[in-house]
Amino acid sequence: MISRSLARALLASVALMTAGGLLAGCNSDQVSLATNAKANQPVPPKLLAAMAEKDMDLQSPILVRLFKQEAELEVWKQTRSGQFALLKTYPICRWSGDLGPKVREGDRQAPEGFYSINPGQMNPQSAYYLSFNTGYPNAFDKALGRTGSQLMVHGDCSSRGCYAMTDEQIAEIYSLGRESFFGGQKAFQLQAYPFKMTPVNMAKHRNNPNMPFWKMIKEGYDHFEVTRQEPKVDFCEKKYVFDAAKPADAKRDPVFDASAKCPAYVIPEDIVAAVRGKQAKDEAEYAKLVAKGTPVARMNTGIDGGMNKVFAAKIPEGSTGLSEGAEGTTLQMLAMAKAPGTIPSHVNPPKPNLDAVASAPAPQQEPVVAVSAPATSTRVASAQPAEKSQEKSQEKSGGFFSNLGRKMGIGSSDTTATTPPPQATASVAPAAAPTTPTTAASRLKAAVSRFVPGNDKKDAAKDAPKPAVAAAKPAEPAKPDTRLAQTRPALKPSVSDGAGEATQIMGAAPVVSSNSFDSRFSAMK
């Protein structure tokens, strides 16, 4: 029986590779899914208990939501009632770029929008422990000419345009996706947002030039919020359309093309009424917040992405960057708490990009508080120059020895181990407009003062223009990664159950169960 199941699993692996080519990020030395112990780790007992408590089946469909500003990944799972309920929220260890959608290859932006994840996008041979491809660019992105590839959700807490978790977290998320495929789900939906689409956040970011796009994807956010069902996503006229259905007099379903005119369609009246009611409440609350002068969020001044506060608290001089901590919670309060997984020594926390700051317009041009400033005065920081080394090349292992060398700290790394400045202080008031012409050095100094507490209180005599190299805090030498290969085991303990329960003898080949990913998926097929 075991021999027959194993043979069927191996045949399924060959069929998958023949039909779809190599899985995303894999290379020619990949092994069968049936022998990949990382990809076959079971769902932790604590998560199984949570599913039972919430009336969920192990193999019921899932849905994933990502929020940059909160630095959180939510896994929702369908209950026996047919609606989705929140199973678990995972803090994101690292994401890169700015709030806003990805536009082009090399901009370091983590994507925003609605994407679909099928079994072929699950990568058990990732250079970042485990991963799955987000599916960027989707039809909407392509219609706008947006470019980029190999945008992942993966482990290793390292990002150049991805959403990075710890290895333990991605192992758990991967197992949930795998089980949903075993249960018959053909693809699970990934919803990526700049922040939770609440009236408060919409008011804080009302001057952001990405607001039209955010309002469009908020429509899908609202559909899910009121129905607790995965919204059906279509594209036409270079926009998103949610839960479209054929008109009553139509003989067939409408055909959508992201670049073409929208076909005739309707949205079920019960969904329309529920969404309209939610949006009316949101808009009323939004108007109140704007009327009372809710401060406008400061635009990105060169910070590269964000990190959840629970991880920033574990790193010397760590910063959450563009992410925000909960009110009343400081990094010092979280320093003694247990981290949800292993934080690698090469983690690169968010910090100002001084090159981008120096080339940006003068700081006084950016609105800091809501004083009925026109939207045209809003400044958008220039994008960071494209880099030659992309997530695509890093995701690929490049062979056994090169991958091993990278993991041991030999060769190139995708992170810069410089010491970040302390967390930005939101209460610092903008400096008075200078009476002398602004220079790159003065703009750099003004920008750095926003991230280094106390710089705004220095004597005026010390504020004379200085060379850019003197304004920036000298970077500490990069600390070499001295990790040995055996310090990064193939299997990671579950973040839900604390210590791992490894039963495999060191050096032994992994035991493949008859219900491995490959054999079970092939049986479903």
Image (cartoon, rainbow, N blue to C red):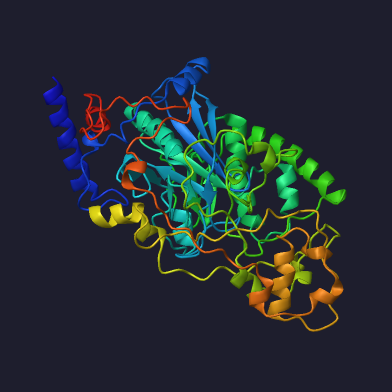
Whether residue 56 is visible, yes or no, is: no
Of residues 419 and 252, the one drawn nearer to the viewer in this rendering: 419
Q: How far across and down, in percent of the image, does residue 462 sit?
A: 81, 74
Q: In this view, does 261 lie to the left or right of 468?
A: left
Q: In this view, does 426 lie to the left or right of 331?
A: right
Farthest bottom residue in view: 437
Residue at x 52% of width, y 35% of height: 340
Residue at x 38% of width, y 63% of height: 412
Quadrant for residue 251, please give it: top left
| Quadrant holding the C terminus | top left
Number of marks: 0
Whether residue 313 is visible, yes or no, is: yes
Q: How far across and down, in percent of the image, does residue 213 sit?
A: 61, 55
Q: In this view, does 309 lie to the left or right of 50?
A: right
Q: Is residue 291 left or right of residue 211?
A: right
Of residues 68 and 293, the one drawn nearer to the viewer in this rendering: 68
| Quadrant holding the N terminus | top left
Of residues 3 and 278, the one drawn nearer to the viewer in this rendering: 3
Q: How far across and down, in percent of the image, does residue 432 sit?
A: 86, 70
Quadrant for residue 71, please give it: top right
Q: How far across and down, in percent of the image, does residue 382 sit?
A: 61, 70
Residue at x 46% of width, y 41% of height: 166
Quadrant for residue 218, please give it: top right
